[in-house]
Amino acid sequence: MMPEVSIRIGERLFKVSCQDGEESALHQAAGLLNTEAKTLEGQSRRLPEGQMLLMAGLMVADKHVAAASERRQLEEAVARQEARIKDLEGQVEHGRMQAAPHDDRVSEALARIAERMEALAELAERKSGAHA
Protein backbone atom coordinates (compact mmCIF):
# COMPACT_ATOMS: atom_id res chain seq x y z
CA MET A 1 0.00 0.00 0.00
CA MET A 2 1.28 3.45 -0.89
CA PRO A 3 1.81 5.90 1.97
CA GLU A 4 -0.45 8.93 2.06
CA VAL A 5 1.20 12.24 2.84
CA SER A 6 -0.44 15.52 3.84
CA ILE A 7 1.06 18.60 2.22
CA ARG A 8 0.07 22.24 2.48
CA ILE A 9 0.08 24.46 -0.57
CA GLY A 10 -1.05 27.97 0.16
CA GLU A 11 -3.97 27.80 2.54
CA ARG A 12 -5.08 24.34 1.47
CA LEU A 13 -4.12 20.93 2.82
CA PHE A 14 -3.81 18.10 0.28
CA LYS A 15 -3.51 14.36 0.85
CA VAL A 16 -1.23 12.77 -1.73
CA SER A 17 -0.11 9.18 -2.23
CA CYS A 18 3.49 8.39 -3.09
CA GLN A 19 5.85 5.46 -3.37
CA ASP A 20 7.24 4.08 -0.14
CA GLY A 21 10.41 6.01 0.77
CA GLU A 22 9.52 9.07 -1.35
CA GLU A 23 7.79 10.97 1.43
CA SER A 24 10.75 13.26 2.09
CA ALA A 25 11.14 14.14 -1.60
CA LEU A 26 7.41 14.85 -1.82
CA HIS A 27 7.57 17.18 1.19
CA GLN A 28 10.55 18.95 -0.35
CA ALA A 29 8.77 19.41 -3.69
CA ALA A 30 5.62 20.60 -1.92
CA GLY A 31 7.76 23.10 0.01
CA LEU A 32 9.02 24.58 -3.26
CA LEU A 33 5.49 24.83 -4.62
CA ASN A 34 4.23 26.31 -1.35
CA THR A 35 6.96 28.98 -1.39
CA GLU A 36 5.78 30.13 -4.82
CA ALA A 37 2.13 29.94 -3.75
CA LYS A 38 2.87 32.22 -0.77
CA THR A 39 4.55 34.67 -3.13
CA LEU A 40 1.41 34.74 -5.25
CA GLU A 41 -0.85 35.05 -2.19
CA GLY A 42 1.19 38.06 -1.11
CA GLN A 43 0.28 39.93 -4.24
CA SER A 44 -2.59 42.39 -4.02
CA ARG A 45 -5.11 40.51 -6.18
CA ARG A 46 -6.56 37.18 -5.09
CA LEU A 47 -6.22 34.33 -7.58
CA PRO A 48 -8.63 31.42 -7.76
CA GLU A 49 -7.07 28.27 -6.24
CA GLY A 50 -6.61 26.48 -9.57
CA GLN A 51 -4.92 29.46 -11.19
CA MET A 52 -2.73 30.00 -8.10
CA LEU A 53 -1.60 26.35 -8.18
CA LEU A 54 -0.95 26.57 -11.93
CA MET A 55 1.06 29.78 -11.57
CA ALA A 56 3.03 28.40 -8.60
CA GLY A 57 3.80 25.25 -10.59
CA LEU A 58 4.92 27.33 -13.56
CA MET A 59 7.18 29.43 -11.33
CA VAL A 60 8.82 26.27 -9.93
CA ALA A 61 9.15 24.86 -13.46
CA ASP A 62 10.72 28.14 -14.65
CA LYS A 63 13.31 27.93 -11.88
CA HIS A 64 13.98 24.31 -12.83
CA VAL A 65 14.48 25.24 -16.49
CA ALA A 66 16.83 28.08 -15.51
CA ALA A 67 18.80 25.78 -13.20
CA ALA A 68 19.04 23.11 -15.92
CA SER A 69 20.28 25.71 -18.39
CA GLU A 70 22.85 26.97 -15.89
CA ARG A 71 23.94 23.39 -15.24
CA ARG A 72 24.42 22.79 -18.98
CA GLN A 73 26.47 25.98 -19.23
CA LEU A 74 28.60 24.90 -16.27
CA GLU A 75 29.07 21.43 -17.75
CA GLU A 76 30.16 23.01 -21.04
CA ALA A 77 32.58 25.30 -19.18
CA VAL A 78 33.99 22.29 -17.32
CA ALA A 79 34.37 20.40 -20.62
CA ARG A 80 36.21 23.40 -22.12
CA GLN A 81 38.50 23.59 -19.09
CA GLU A 82 39.16 19.84 -19.20
CA ALA A 83 40.03 20.14 -22.91
CA ARG A 84 42.34 23.06 -22.10
CA ILE A 85 44.01 21.03 -19.34
CA LYS A 86 44.49 18.12 -21.74
CA ASP A 87 45.95 20.50 -24.33
CA LEU A 88 48.33 22.00 -21.74
CA GLU A 89 49.35 18.52 -20.59
CA GLY A 90 50.11 17.70 -24.23
CA GLN A 91 52.19 20.85 -24.53
CA VAL A 92 54.11 19.97 -21.37
CA GLU A 93 54.74 16.44 -22.67
CA HIS A 94 55.86 17.85 -26.02
CA GLY A 95 58.23 20.19 -24.15
CA ARG A 96 59.60 17.25 -22.19
CA MET A 97 60.18 15.30 -25.38
CA GLN A 98 62.05 18.23 -26.92
CA ALA A 99 64.05 18.68 -23.74
CA ALA A 100 64.83 14.97 -23.47
CA PRO A 101 67.44 14.89 -26.26
CA HIS A 102 69.19 17.81 -24.59
CA ASP A 103 69.04 15.99 -21.26
CA ASP A 104 70.43 12.89 -22.98
CA ARG A 105 73.30 14.92 -24.44
CA VAL A 106 74.07 16.38 -21.03
CA SER A 107 73.96 12.91 -19.46
CA GLU A 108 76.26 11.55 -22.16
CA ALA A 109 78.68 14.45 -21.71
CA LEU A 110 78.70 13.92 -17.95
CA ALA A 111 79.35 10.20 -18.46
CA ARG A 112 82.30 11.01 -20.77
CA ILE A 113 83.67 13.50 -18.21
CA ALA A 114 83.32 10.87 -15.47
CA GLU A 115 85.14 8.31 -17.61
CA ARG A 116 87.89 10.82 -18.37
CA MET A 117 88.20 11.69 -14.65
CA GLU A 118 88.49 8.00 -13.78
CA ALA A 119 91.14 7.58 -16.45
CA LEU A 120 93.05 10.59 -15.11
CA ALA A 121 92.71 9.28 -11.56
CA GLU A 122 94.11 5.90 -12.63
CA LEU A 123 96.95 7.61 -14.48
CA ALA A 124 97.71 9.79 -11.47
CA GLU A 125 97.60 6.74 -9.22
CA ARG A 126 99.99 4.83 -11.50
CA LYS A 127 102.36 7.76 -11.68
CA SER A 128 102.29 8.28 -7.94
CA GLY A 129 102.90 4.55 -7.42
CA ALA A 130 105.79 4.60 -9.91
CA HIS A 131 107.45 7.49 -8.06
CA ALA A 132 107.05 5.95 -4.64
Image (tube, rainbow, N blue to C red):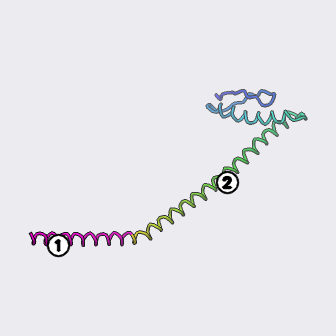
Rendering coords of residue 11 (x, y %):
81, 28
Crowding near the residue tagged with mark 2, few <14, some 14–19, many ≥20 C-alpha atoms within 10 Å? few
Residue at 87% x, 35% y: name it: 43
Instruction: Please tell me the numbered disc located at residue 73.
Output: 2
Q: Which residues are magenta?
A: 103-132
Amino acid identity at mark 2: Gln
Q: Nearer the viewer, residue 104 or 50?
A: 104
Is 13 rendered above or below residue 47? above
Give whichever of discs 1 and 2 has the lower sequence position: 2
**Quadrant of res 42:** top right
**Quadrant of res 103:** bottom left
Direction from residue 109 to residue 71 in the image, left or right: right
Rendering coords of residue 117 (x, y %):
24, 70
Rendering coords of residue 131 (x, y %):
10, 71
Amino acid identity at mark 1: Leu
Crowding near the residue tagged with mark 1, few <14, some 14–19, many ≥20 C-alpha atoms within 10 Å? few
> Marks 1 and 2, how far apart in space?
73 Å
For label 1, the residue is: 123
Instruction: Please tell me the numbered disc located at residue 43.
Output: none
Residue at 65% x, 29% y: name it: 2
Is 68 rendered above or below residue 49? below
Q: Is residue 9 located in the magenta-colored stretch of the structure?
A: no
Q: Quadrant of the C terminus?
A: bottom left
Q: Nearer the viewer, residue 109 or 91?
A: 109
